[in-house]
Image (cartoon, rainbow, N blue to C red):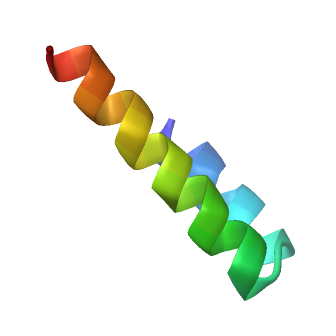
Amino acid sequence: MKVKISAVFKRTDFKTRQKAAFFDKIRFYKDLT
């Protein structure tokens, strides 16, 4: 999973990468609760 995400990040610009990381964080915290 992480390898796939890294590959996607390499093809995207910084803003898209930040947005994706932000939504991933939200998803991660939702899974914890």
Image quarter where the C terminus lies is top left
Q: Position of residue 19 (x, y in %)?
A: 63, 63
Left or right of 32 in this view: 6: right
Name the residue at the bottom extreme.
Answer: 14
Question: Viewer-proximal residue, 1 or 31?
Answer: 31
Name the residue at the left extreme.
Answer: 33
The residue positioned 81% from the left and 82% from the top of the image is 13
The residue positioned 66% from the left and 70% from the top of the image is 17
In the image, is residue 2 above or below residue 6? Answer: above
In the image, is residue 15 above or below residue 17? Answer: below
The residue positioned 51% from the left and 59% from the top of the image is 21
Q: Position of residue 12 (x, y in %)?
A: 82, 73
Q: Position of residue 18 (x, y in %)?
A: 59, 72
Question: Viewer-proximal residue, 33 or 9?
Answer: 33
The residue positioned 59% from the left and 61% from the top of the image is 6
Q: Position of residue 15 (x, y in %)?
A: 73, 80
Left or right of 5 in this view: 29: left
Total marks in image: 0
In the image, is residue 7 above or below residue 29? Answer: below
Left or right of 28 in this view: 32: left
Question: Viewer-proximal residue, 4 or 31?
Answer: 31
Question: Viewer-proximal residue, 26 or 4?
Answer: 26
In the image, is residue 6 above or below residue 31? Answer: below
Picture quadrant of residue 20: bottom right
